[in-house]
Image (cartoon, rainbow, N blue to C red):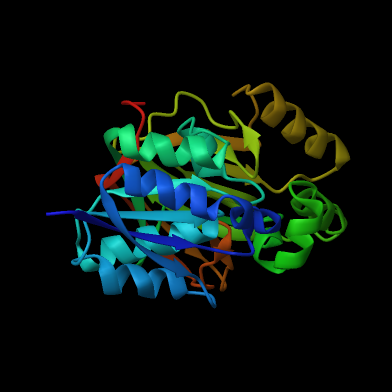
Amino acid sequence: MEKKLVFIFNPKAGKGKIKTSLMEIVDIFNKGGYEVIIRATQAPRDAYEQVKKYADQVDLIVCSGGDGTLDEVVTGITEVGSNVPIGYIPAGSTNDFANSLFMPKNMLDAASMIMDGEIYKCDVGRFNHQTFAYVAAFGLFTDVSYETSQDLKNILGHLAYVLEGAKRLLDIKSYHMKVVTESGVIEDNFIYGMVTNSRSVGGFKNLTKDVVMNDGLFEVTLIVQPKNPLEMQEIIRNLLSMEDNSDLIYSFKARKLTIEADEAVAWTLDGEYGGSPEVVEIENLKQALNLRLRSAQ
């Protein structure tokens, strides 16, 4: 009996690059022994709805788009409790998740890898009642991805995020927060924080050290509000040099953490708006996602 695959793609992602490769990708899937169901996303959350619809009807789900499309697919899979494997063909502006797992940048190579690949069990994150694939973040520039229009992303590509962020440099807000982990409590005023399972964030690689994407641990980075331009320079220097010798940056690993703020704080999950809660519980769901990759990463 022929296996079934649903291919869910965002036709706008990455300047619409899927359009020139769609039929060749489908041909690769057919040659791999799959009957292919094709679904182009029509609106936000459409990939999520398609996954919930097809998860129990297919042997493999493949998505193509940016990290937001992947986030919808991961959320759908997690919510329905399915173990169906996922393949990912990156086509967005930044593609942090794909970069972290060394996926091919060429779409046809990525499709072939999915057909020939093995199952890699990857961690995902739980954010209150939501799911994220690789990053939950708040503060400085974290709203850049979801406030930058799809058309601007397509025209400027990776620079879209940097340019939009540059306009915000003179307007830095801090949040008073208490962060509780299995190792202790941190309380301070933060301008930025990220909880990640990724070797690349915002297109910048190696912002966190010793990343293993299936170890059940997040990498957590919290940046304290600088009191003057010299402290801001210290923060930037330490981030770029990967040094851990600044009192202005907390960097640690955690399986689970609770973050309490004095006010509502806007969060981004995989580059998409994740709500503005005052209290957040974040948990690592160890090896909860079955990915088709070339080999164990």
Compared with 37, 95 (above or below) is above
Picture layout, residue 138 above or below residue 250:
below
Whether residue 203 is visible here, answered yes or no, is: yes
Q: Please name the residue shown 74% across and 46% down the image.
A: 158
Q: Is residue 241 left or right of residue 123?
A: right
Would you say residue 127 is visible in this rendering?
A: no
Nearest the viewer among 239 and 249 is 239
* Residue furthest out toward the left: 1
Snapshot quadrant of residue 253: top left
Residue 40: x %, y % from top left? 50, 69
Give percent across and percent down for residue 273: 56, 68
Q: Residue at x 82, y 34 (%)?
A: 233
Q: Nearer the viewer, residue 145 or 94?
A: 94
At horizontal 51% and vertical 40% (from top left) the residue drawn is 108
> Closest to the observer: 266 or 156?
156
Q: Would residue 223 appear left or right of 199 to someone viewing this image?
A: right
User: Can you name the residue that lies furthest to the bottom here?
Assistant: 43
Q: In this rendered view, identify the residue nearer to me: 260 or 102.
A: 102
Q: Position of residue 12 (x, y in %)?
A: 64, 64
Quadrant for the C terminus in the image: top left
**Where is residue 10, by image quadrant?**
bottom right
Q: How many marks are shown on the rendered structure?
A: 0
What residue is shown at x 11% (from left), y 54% (from top)? 1
Does 226 sit left or right of 59 as displayed?
right
Where is residue 252 drawn, in percent x and y?
A: 46, 34
